[in-house]
Amino acid sequence: MFGVLIVCYLFLGGLGGGLCLVLSLVGLTVPREELGRRITAPYCSFFRYGYAVSACSLIAAALCLLVDSGNHGALAYLFFSGRITYLSVGSYLLVGGVALSAVFAYLWAVRSSVRRVRAFRALQIAAALVGLAVALYTGLFLASMQAVPFWNTLWLPALFLLSSVSCGLVAALIVGHMSGVSLQFEQYFARMAAIDAAVIVLEAVCLLGLVLGSLFAGGSDSASAAASASASALLFGEYAWVFWSVSVALGLVAAFVVDATVMRAGQILPGRPCYSLVPGVCVFAGAFALRFCMVMAGEHPVASLLGA
């Protein structure tokens, strides 16, 4: 049903949406006086590069979805048919996310000050909402498919949303290091590491709820059997080693340990970008592996039950 391109779409869409959400919320904390007079270089560097990464991630996600569909001629119909479907809503959200990220990347790059602060704040709120919707949609995209009972649960959108927010937080840390503003935003980044640790805990709770709810599905019908088989395949099947070693050990446990270390120190390790790449590798690898395992574990038992 789905291949690696869809997994890439889910990961890149979540990353771009999560980063857009994080940047917009952080942008709302920039003092009004800072926006009204000449904006300092660290703010400009951090936000323009961050929004550029968000836009590129969302564009890459859209390209993965387009290439996987193979029906490029239906693109116009998707936008102008007038029908409201999960796919059409997701497409509009991707376009909106790319547009808003590109606008903010441009504004932070060329504007030395903001004259209409209220309008700027309103646009930031809109970008945060669109980023949230994109991140949530990546889970709803799978959860809407009733043919796969393992996906058809509210745990999945919540899990993907939290994973996307975690990716956005870590991506913002990496952008801060790479753009050379880690020292100026040290307190921001230390708080973001603390928030990421809390998000990872919630993500683990959602993952546990999804797996246990599917594994011990109470019904005796084929849907319950398929959900239980998917959970078993995830925990003990062909892709279990990816799930346990990358999704859980690296993406949850190792990432939480790094965040806890930063929280205990009360600061990040400034000046060297490699220090931000460690949690980045953990979270990004774990997030990609999580989506890969969820897609594969959901598909294979259903295909087996159908005799494929």
Image (spheres, grey):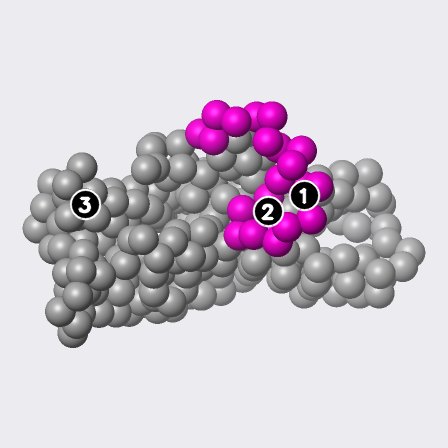
In the drawing, does residue 13 fall left or right of residue 265? right
Query: Cα distance, mark 3 to mark 1?
Result: 33 Å
Q: Which mark is residue 201?
A: none
Q: Residue at x 40, y 37 (%)?
A: 6
Q: Residue at x 32, y 53 (%)?
A: 147
Q: Can residue 182 be seen in this view?
A: no
In the drawing, does residue 88 fall left or right of residue 148? right
Instruction: Considering the whole magenta stretch, tell me its main secondary structure.
Output: helix
Query: Cα distance, mark 2 to mark 3?
Result: 29 Å
In this view, the mark in front (2 or 3): 3
Q: Which residue position is annotated with label 2?
A: 88
Q: Residues within 10 Å of mark 2 (few under 14, many from 20)?
A: some
| For marks 2 and 1 on the same chain, the one whose residue lies earlier in the sequence | 1
Task: Indicate yes or no whether the magenta region holds residue 267.
Answer: no
Element on which disc 2 rests: helix
Q: Which mark is residue 81?
A: 1
Q: Which residue is drawn at 85% across and 45% down?
A: 112
When the figure is inspected, residue 132 is found, relative to residue 167, above or below; the finding is below
Q: Can residue 57 be seen in this view?
A: yes
Q: What residue type is labelled 2?
A: Ser
Marks 2,1: beta carbons within 8 A? yes
Element on which disc 1 rests: loop
The magenta span reads 67-91
Q: Which mark is residue 306?
A: 3
**Where does residue 109 sit, x and y in percent of width and height?**
76, 39
